[in-house]
Amino acid sequence: MRASIPGDATALAATPRNIRPTRADRLFQPVMGWLVRRGVSLAGARTLAVRGRTSGEWRTTVVNPLDLGDQRFLVAPRGHTQWVRNLRVALQGELRIGRRTEQFTAIEVADSEKVPVLREYLVRWWWEVGRFFDGLDKHSTDAELLAVAPDFPVFRITSRG
């Protein structure tokens, strides 16, 4: 296993962590997607659209963008998923809700910088994503969060116009 370098498109799977959706997820996610496409955001949810790394076709999934101070982040609670791999290559995408579209550029965050982002993500969405963090929560130590940081890709996103 080689170390992931932020923005390194060849580091597609720095760790083996990629949690597949459960049966309940496969039922719930389409409902969330349907709501977000119609402009209804539960807890800040948006549709992430990013070009496929080989097909060039738009690929979409529902995400929870995190505003932290004056910066914005996308966290991948399921690990190194397809949207993460696509975003590493594309370095840009769109966040959509209803008919509104926000284009952005993305830079992957180094593991050493992820602790405050992961902690705030757990504060806001633990009820939804806590099961992916193997018992960690907002009260976990910095050392515990730093230890799992390689398993959870984080991107700093900046609006483009």
Image: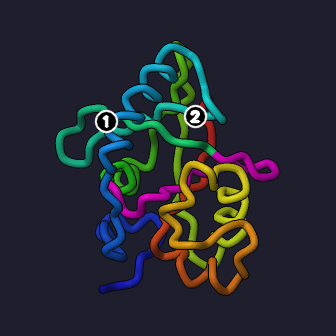
Label disc, if present, on residue 45 of the rendered structure: 2
Look at 40% across and 50% down and name the residue there: 87
Name the spot of residue 65 as percent of width and height, x first.
61, 43
Other-residue count near label 2 (Cα within 10 Å), few / some / many at <14 / 14–19 / ≥20: many
Q: Which range of residues does the magenta coloring cover?
A: 66-81
Q: Is residue 92 above or below residue 97?
A: below
Other-residue count near label 1 (Cα within 10 Å), few / some / many at <14 / 14–19 / ≥20: some
- In this view, the residue in front, 76 or 86, is 76
Q: In this view, does 76 lie above or below 116?
A: above
Name the spot of residue 139 as percent of width and height, x first.
75, 72
- In this view, the residue in front, 12 or 40, is 40
Look at 58% across and 42% down and name the residue there: 64
Q: Is residue 43 above or below residue 89?
A: above
Is 33 left or right of 161, judged from the image as shown? left
Label disc, if present, on residue 120 of the rendered structure: none
The residue under label 1 is 59
Q: Where is the C terminus found, in terms of image quarters?
A: top right
Is 115 left or right of 46, judged from the image as shown? right
Q: Residue 156: say if magenta.
A: no
Residue placed farthest to the front in the image? 24
CA separation in Å, label 2 and label 1 = 16 Å
Q: What element carries label 2?
A: loop
Q: In which quarter of the image is residue 52?
A: top left
**Amino acid bearing label 2:** Ala
Q: Where is the N terminus found, in terms of image quarters?
A: bottom left
Name the spot of residue 114 as percent of width and height, x first.
63, 70
Q: Pick whichever of labels 2 and 1 is earlier in the sequence.
A: 2
Look at 41% across and 76% down and name the residue there: 4
Residue placed farthest to the right in the image? 69
Nearer to us: label 2 or label 1: 2
**Amino acid bearing label 1:** Arg
